[in-house]
Every structure is written in structure tokens, then in C-alpha cells.
Image (tube, rainbow, N blue to C red):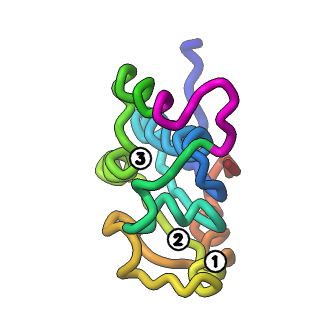
Amino acid sequence: MGKERNIKKVSIIISKNGLEDVLAGLIMAHGARMEGIDVMVFFTFFGLDVILKDRVNQLKLSKEEGITTEAFFKAMEKFDIPPVKEFVEMVYDFGAKLYACKATADMWGIKKEDLLPEVEDIISVGQFYTLSDDAQHIIFI
């Protein structure tokens, strides 16, 4: 505690679409931005559902062990955790850069206009690594 932080930039990869995974990634991104850390979020595979206009509001828990998706949404509300679409907007508004994976987008026929407006671009894995070159951490969720 009280130690100066050396982390200046993190890259977060969201590859899943379960609410518990998505929220973990968005919480990490938001928390980093609140600490003044530069953040880049790269959505790939099923993580693209988070930034697709027609899927973002349809996310569910990947495992409903002891809690239903509906109960989870109620708990989110109780603890003032915004819905996923609003959370994505908030992370973006706080300065995080959001990108979609080109290989996955191409595989599924996804175009830029299919994505939420907060998504900066559709980029390749190579471009992700270039943009992450000075990141101290890459977090895979």
C-alpha cells in the first residue's frame, strides 16, 4: 500500500459471452481507467456478442449454478452494476479503446456497422499486438 504503481497500460481480451465473464472484463477495464491506466479491450470469438448491436442485450450466464440469469440481473441492479450495453458505453466514455477481432468478424460476416458505435475498429491479431506493445499486462477473459 502506498507504493507507486508502474502499470501504465493494460490490454484486455474478452473471448467469452457469459455475463460473469463479460462483467469481469468490463470491471477490470473500468477499474483500470479509474486508476488512470490506459486500456484497450479486444473482443474476439464469442466476446464479439458483447459489442454486436443485436446481441449485447441477449447475454446470459454461461453456467447457472445456484442462480438464474434473471436473479443475476436483479443482483446487478441491487449493486448498481449497469446493464452490459451501458457498461460498454461507460468504459468507452472513461477513455478505453475498444476493438473487434478481424478474423472472427470475417468468419461470422460481421461488418463495422453491426457493432456498437463505441468500437473503434475491426483489427487483426497482429494489429492488437502492435497496439499492446507497451502494455504491462494482457488479461485474457
Q: Which residue is pictured at 59% across the width and 54% down the height?
A: 17
Q: Is residue 70 magenta?
A: yes
Magenta residues, as a range?
62-72
Q: Which residue is mark 2?
A: 100
Q: Secondary structure at mark 2?
A: strand
Identity of the amino acid at label 1? Thr
Answer whether labels 3 and 1 touch (C-beta < 8 Å): no
Q: Which residue is pictured at 56% across the width and 32% down the height?
A: 68
**Mark before the other along the chain sequence, 3 or 1:** 3
Q: Please tell me in which quadrant of the rendered image residue 76 appears.
A: top left
Viewer-closest of 102 and 95: 102
Say few, some or many: other residues with alpha carbon within 10 Å of mark 1 (under 14 / 14 to 19 / 20 or more).
some
**Mark before the other along the chain sequence, 2 or 3:** 3
Residue 6 x/y as whole percent: 60, 36
Q: Which residue is mark 1?
A: 104
Q: Which residue is pictured at 66% across the width and 67% down the height?
A: 45
- Left or right side of 22 for 126: right
Whole-number angstrom distance, CA of label 3 to CA of label 1:
21 Å
Q: Which residue is mark 3?
A: 84
Identity of the amino acid at label 2? Ala
